[in-house]
């Protein structure tokens, strides 16, 4: 059999711990036998990030802007323990944060729906995709503890030195205060990413804020989305047979619970953080969730939504058997390969991605799965496989 050729490389970002082990297995059993894999390789494993003073992370993000498509393995975000464990020169920043800051994007997360792993919300028939704005709000806030009586104001000092003030509160005793911000540019690119992704995947967009209470802050999100939709997307949406729907966040939550799914739920940064964990666990497992960062320039970075599965890795190091779910990492690869295929007009490559996803789903639906799924499946007498057996079972079907 001739291997499938690739004209343009994919940016390959290798990672850490158990997911790094899965990464190699996926390449060996599921990709390299069928594809002349053309990647530009960046080792984002913590040791090499430390060795290059994290330059490799920046290089990999720049390469993503050049080639448009990247696939990323889960990586360690160092904390004090990791600094000791790896004798790091510095507590390097989160690679995802660094990459997001360079690509300026929106993160889309969608559950992988399989028969036998039913969502605990019974009426959810189709996946719900969360689109999370990845800039600002409380994640870039400044805070103060107020010790006692006194006045707190917001002060804007313009370039000419003139000041605009707004009273936050006249404190009569101790309390707390928080200041946060966002940028019109970033909100605009958030809106465009959501609308582009909706056209790509032919799904409706729902967006919600608390604009009735937050008449300037949240209302600006609402207005920018509406302006951009009317200016650039209304006609394209009509043509594609999809809609844009705005409502209040509490109304959105109520409607989501009663819906059958199948749409993109655009969320402000904090709402997206909270709601994506609710959606993923309601659909079964963090290991059954795809995640892609889409930049306003149309760069795509695919990854798994979970971490490096440290506990399993330590078992693996001791020579013990692991049963780590590789589905999200496989789907990161298929997402990247399909996008590469679409951008290059390489139909064979895109078709391969479809087949690999189907083989993965068929394997689980036939009752062969990793332990995390075997514990929650409605399929009778499932076979719990170890990490490698599961990947080999997919290879057999593929
Ligand atoms: P984690 O790797 O997501 O794992 C947490 C737990 O969830 C695991 O111990 C395991 O439960 C279960 N789990 C997650 N993925 C699984 C899979 N594929 N198959 C089976 N079970 C799975 O989170 P963590 O252990 O808190 O974090 C480990 C490292 O990952 C940290 O250093 C963190 O910085 C990093 N991280 C990276 C990313 C990223 O790169 N996108 C995201 C999050 C965290 P059981 O132990 O009960 O089996
Ligand atoms: Mg979270």
Image (cartoon, rainbow, N blue to C red):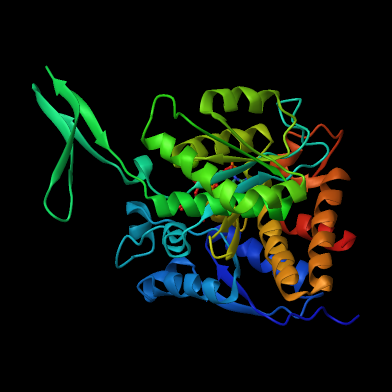
Q: Is residue 109 above or below residue 329?
A: above
Does residue 73 appear left or right of residue 378 in this picture? left
What percent of the width, then of the height, locates residue 200? 70, 55
What percent of the width, then of the height, locates residue 366? 89, 45
Residue with the most extreme left position: 149
- Quadrant where the image shows the N terminus: bottom right
Q: Is residue 258 above or below residue 244?
A: above
What percent of the width, then of the height, locates residue 341? 75, 71
Residue with the most extreme right position: 1
Q: Residue at x 77, y 32 (%)?
A: 118
Q: Quadrant of residue 115?
A: top right
Q: Quadrant of residue 376?
A: top right
Does residue 182 appear left or right of residue 103 in this picture? left
Q: Nearer the viewer, residue 262 or 214?
A: 214
Q: Nearer the viewer, residue 397 or 354?
A: 354
Q: Residue at x 45, y 41 (%)?
A: 221
- Quadrant where the image shows the C terminus: bottom right
Q: Residue at x 67, y 53 (%)?
A: 328
What percent of the width, then of the height, locates residue 295? 53, 60
């Amino acid at each position: 059999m001739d291997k499938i050729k690739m004209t343009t490389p994919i940016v390959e970002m290798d990672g850490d711990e158990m997911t790094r082990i899965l990464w190699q297995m996926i390449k060996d059993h599921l990709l390299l036998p069928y594809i002349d894999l053309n990647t530009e390789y960046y080792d984002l494993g913590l040791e090499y990030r430390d060795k290059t003073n994290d330059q490799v992370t920046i290089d990999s993000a720049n390469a993503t802007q050049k080639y448009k498509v990247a696939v990323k393995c889960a990586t360690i975000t160092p904390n004090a323990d990791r600094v000791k464990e790896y004798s790091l020169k510095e507590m390097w920043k989160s690679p995802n944060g660094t990459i997001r800051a360079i690509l300026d994007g929106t993160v889309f997360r969608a559950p992988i729906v399989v028969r036998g792993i039913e969502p605990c919300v019974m009426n959810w028939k189709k996946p719900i995709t969360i689109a999370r704005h990845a800039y600002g709000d409380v994640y870039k806030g400044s805070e103060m503890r107020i010790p006692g009586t006194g006045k707190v104001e917001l002060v804007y000092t313009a370039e000419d030195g003139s000041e605009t003030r707004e009273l936050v509160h006249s404190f009569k005793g101790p309390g707390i205060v928080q200041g946060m911000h966002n940028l019109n540019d970033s909100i605009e690119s958030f809106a465009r990413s959501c609308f582009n992704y909706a056209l790509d995947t032919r799904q409706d967009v729902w967006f919600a804020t608390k604009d009735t209470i937050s008449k300037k802050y949240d209302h600006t999100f609402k207005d920018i989305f509406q302006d951009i939709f009317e200016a650039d997307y209304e006609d394209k949406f009509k043509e594609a047979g999809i809609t844009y729907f705005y409502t209040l966040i509490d109304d959105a939550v109520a409607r989501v619970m009663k819906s059958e799914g199948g749409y993109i739920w655009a969320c402000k940064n904090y709402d997206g953080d909270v709601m994506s964990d609710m959606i993923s666990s309601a659909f079964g497992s963090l290991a059954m969730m795809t995640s892609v960062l889409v930049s306003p320039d149309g760069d795509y970075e695919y990854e798994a939504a979970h971490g490096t599965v440290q506990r399993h890795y330590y078992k693996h190091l001791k020579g013990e058997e692991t049963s780590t779910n590789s589905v999200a990492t496989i789907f990161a690869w298929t997402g990247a390969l399909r996008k590469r295929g679409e951008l290059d007009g390489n139909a064979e490559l895109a078709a391969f991605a479809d087949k690999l996803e189907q083989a993965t789903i068929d394997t689980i639906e036939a009752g062969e799965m990793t332990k995390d799924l075997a514990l929650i499946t409605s399929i009778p007498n499932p076979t719990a496989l170890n990490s490698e057996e599961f990947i080999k079972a997919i290879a057999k079907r593929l």
